[in-house]
Image (cartoon, rainbow, N blue to C red):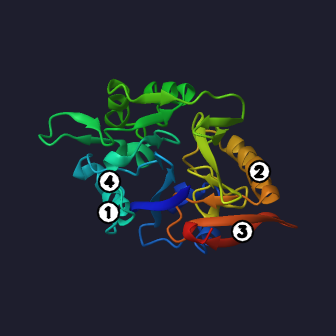
Amino acid sequence: MTIYSINTGYFKLDGGAMFGVVPKSIWQKTNPSDANNMCDWALRCMLIEDGDRLILIDCGIGNKQSDKFFSHYYLFGNDTLDLSLSKHGFHRNDITDVILTHLHFDHCGGAINWNSDHTILEPAFSNAKFWSNKHHWKWATEANKREKASFLKDNILPIEESGQLEHIIRAGRITEGGMHDIDFFFADGHTESQMIPMVKYKDVTIAFMADLLPSVGHIPLPYVMGYDTRPLLTLTEKEEFLNLAADEKFVLFLEHDPIHECCTVKHTEKGIRLDATFSISEV
């Protein structure tokens, strides 16, 4: 098995929204903002090469939305999904499985593209199965008013219409061997049934943290995003998972950290704190 970091670009989000009740005077030490209070964030995905399987976890924001839509998020950088795949000798048609941690637009937008005539929305990975779960799929397709702007029908419904959609069966907090021997931690604080994939790799567990832990700046427990639908639940889920990660020495793969690909955490007198940062190639 080989794991690759796939960067699909960068975007900007409001720092206050990203850190919730934590004051700017504190969070700006790790995530400085611009004059408009916007901070830089990555759109980093994980690619797992395992025998004849090529598994992509999340797929970035995509490029099919309107200029007006993208103007709210200030996309920047030269990285794209296709360029990042090609650097490792792959093409999107080689992907056999796409795991969608959840269906917010910055995690699943790259799953669907316009066809060459710009008339039909179709899967961007023609040979892949798309993996979600029934709890989250229902939550996203019958969206509440708070999250409706994050669940874009153009990103979601064509997956099901294509016949390429599969569901991982949720069985409690942790589902073992849910798909190709990948375990899943289910978290409900950010959104219903967000999936945190956990992969055994070189004698360690690598956890793709999605929005349970967007960056190293979010490691202290109270640092919970304003986007989360149930912030107190997120705090509990973070505590459970980060304690496990410290005990078991998990490698945490960070989807949104603009600088750090991976980190480990440790127990301290002040609670769970950052241990080390590094790239996936150093594991």
SS assignment at label 3: strand
SS assignment at label 2: helix
Q: Nearer the viewer, residue 111 or 95?
A: 95
First along the sequence among labels 2 and 1: 1
Q: Is residue 173 above or below residue 161?
A: below
Q: Amino acid at mark 1?
A: Leu
First along the sequence among labels 1 and 4: 1
Question: Which residue in the rendered view is the most extreme toward the right?
Answer: 269
The picture places residue 60, in percent across and down from the top left corner, at: 40, 52
Mark number, residue 83: 1
SS assignment at label 4: loop
- Between the C-alphas of marks 1 and 4, the distance is 9 Å
- Quick check: 75 left or right of 242? left
Is there a contact, CB below 8 Å, between mark 2 and mark 1?
no
- What residue does disc 4 label? 91
SS assignment at label 1: helix
